[in-house]
Image (cartoon, rainbow, N blue to C red):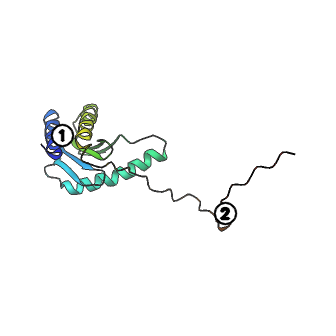
Amino acid sequence: MTAEAEVLEELHRLRARMPRLTGALAAGVDGLVLAQDTPGVEAESLAALTAASLGVALRMADATGRGNLRELLVRGTHGYVATYAAGPSAVLTLLADDQVSVGRLHLEGRRSGARIGELVADVLTPVEPRPAPDRRQARPSPRQQRLPTRPVPPPSAS
């Protein structure tokens, strides 16, 4: 069985365990769909939005010193969108109605994310997402750019 088929099977099992889930998608961090069970939702668009929100979430976690991103939760008036890390190169995005138990959503999402990460580990090349550069960083002045790059010897002891 291919990794994609195994990932799809995991998504089906997850949806069977959690009837309040309305969709499940596994994607690469680059926004390409690996497997999906998202009736009524365009999977390619959801995967692209997941990749974009992942970039913003990584930046937020980094800027606030919260460490590596593990999950992202969005709550709307009609339910939840939850995204979980699935190894270094994939993510799991779950759609749930507004009656879902958020604790159970996290429990099942984390477990399935870990399982999907194992399934795709040999197939996908890990991509190290990088936060966007901080545009507020000061650029070196022309004088600073002309400073010598050779180390200066320490003063001799007299």
Give the x, y percent position of residue 105.
25, 35
Element under disc 2: helix
Q: Nearer the viewer, residue 120 or 44?
A: 120
Alpha-carbon span between mark 1 and mark 2: 56 Å
Q: Which residue is mark 1?
A: 21
- Name which residue lies at 24% across and 47% down: 123
| Residue 99, numbered circle | none
Check disc 1: other Cα within 10 Å, few if <14, some if 14-19, many if 20+: many
* Quadrant where the C terminus is found in the figure: top right
Q: Nearer the viewer, residue 67 or 74?
A: 67
- Image quadrant where residue 140 sits: bottom right
Q: Is residue 133 left or right of residue 154?
A: left
Give the x, y percent position of residue 99.
21, 36
Q: Which residue is mark 2?
A: 144
Q: Which residue of the protein is positioned furthest toward the bottom in this rendering?
A: 142
Q: Is residue 75 left or right of residue 60?
A: left
In the image, which is nearer the foreground, mark 1 or mark 2?
Answer: 2
- Name which residue lies at 72% across and 54% down: 152
Is residue 80 in view?
Answer: no
Q: Is residue 1 above or below residue 29?
A: above
Q: Amino acid at mark 2?
A: Gln
Give the x, y percent position of residue 14.
17, 36
Element under disc 1: strand
Lower position in the chain sequence, tag 1 or tag 2: 1
Give the x, y percent position of residue 138.
59, 59
